[in-house]
Image (cartoon, rainbow, N blue to C red):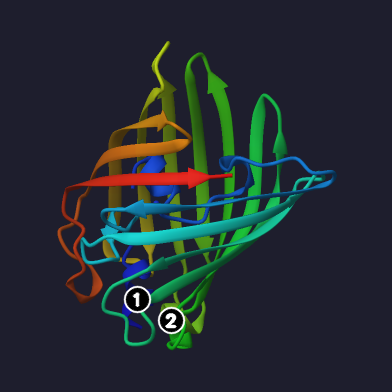
Amino acid sequence: MRNSMLKLAGMSVAISAMALSAPAFAQDEATEAAGPISVSGGVAVVSDYRFRGVSLSDKDFAVQPFLTISHESGLYAGVWGSNIAENPGDDVEVDLYAGFAGGDAVTYDIGATYYMYPGVSSFNYIEFTGKLGSTVGPATVGVQLSYVPSQDNTGDKDNIYFGTNATVAIPNTPISIVGSMGIEDGAFAPGNEKVDWSLGLTAAVSGFTLGASYVDTNRRSTFAFKDSSAGVVFSISYGF
């Protein structure tokens, strides 16, 4: 259960880098309208694949493509992938996700993600997530609650993660300040609660999004001694 337990140890990065380092739900992605069905996607390159503060790429680069199909009703489904480190199967993570999103003044997103590790199906597990978001002045703020029910691949234990995030656009510039904080308890954070946080900047440049974020946790290692110490994560992404 190496990589599953890495997740279980508490694996998102600052809103930009993290949002690009984990499955993005429907309202987080740029969409191209085409009748009742729209398709969005893209690819990100990150200097370190961090998930909830924990490095899953052993502090090495990761390439992370994603694709989402959405219906005007709010239903969506998609796939996200990344290379990972020290996996006894293929060094790949593939996440399948689906849900329902909508709202105006307050947005909502209810979905589920199935984390898959080709070659080591004993690592696979499912997580359910609910999100709320809103705009306050120049800031976009959000909260999420994720729950992993007890299952064989989590050691028959459940897990809960509560996160907050904010993006503040700097007026008259393509730059935004991004930050996040999360608390995890249960199968993925044995012993005591794991806390992760991040702060960084993103910039839209010629159709690309550039990001740099400081990421840290209250732990220095997790299952299999995976690194969760402080670091700066750089990212570049392109979406359609």
How busy is the neighbourhood of tag 1: few (under 14 within 10 Å), some, or many (20 plus)? many
Circle 2 residues within 10 Å: few <14, some 14–19, many ≥20:
many
| Tag 1 residue | 3
**Quadrant showing the N terminus:** bottom left
Residue 49 falls in which quadrant of the image? bottom left
Question: Going from the N terminus, do you reach mark 1 or mark 2 first?
Answer: 1
Residue at coordinates 30% horizontally, 65% vertically from top-left? 56
Amino acid type shown at disc 1: Asn
Q: CA distance from mark 1 to mark 2?
A: 7 Å
Quadrant of residue 28 in the image?
A: top right
Residue 31 percent coordinates (x, y): 66, 42
- Is 161 or 142 nearer to us in this picture? 142
Res 52 seen here: no
- Considering only vertical position in the picture, is 10 above or below 104? below
At numbered mark 1, what does the secondary structure look like: helix, strand or loop? helix
Identity of the residue drawn at 82% across and 45% down: 73
> Residue type at mark 2?
Phe
How many circles with numbers are drawn on the protein?
2
Direction right: furthest residue:
35
Front residue of this view, candidates 61 and 24: 61
- Determine whether the residue tagged by mark 2 lies in a helix, strand or loop: helix
The residue under the point 27% across, 56% down is 48
Q: Is residue 179 above or below residue 53?
A: above
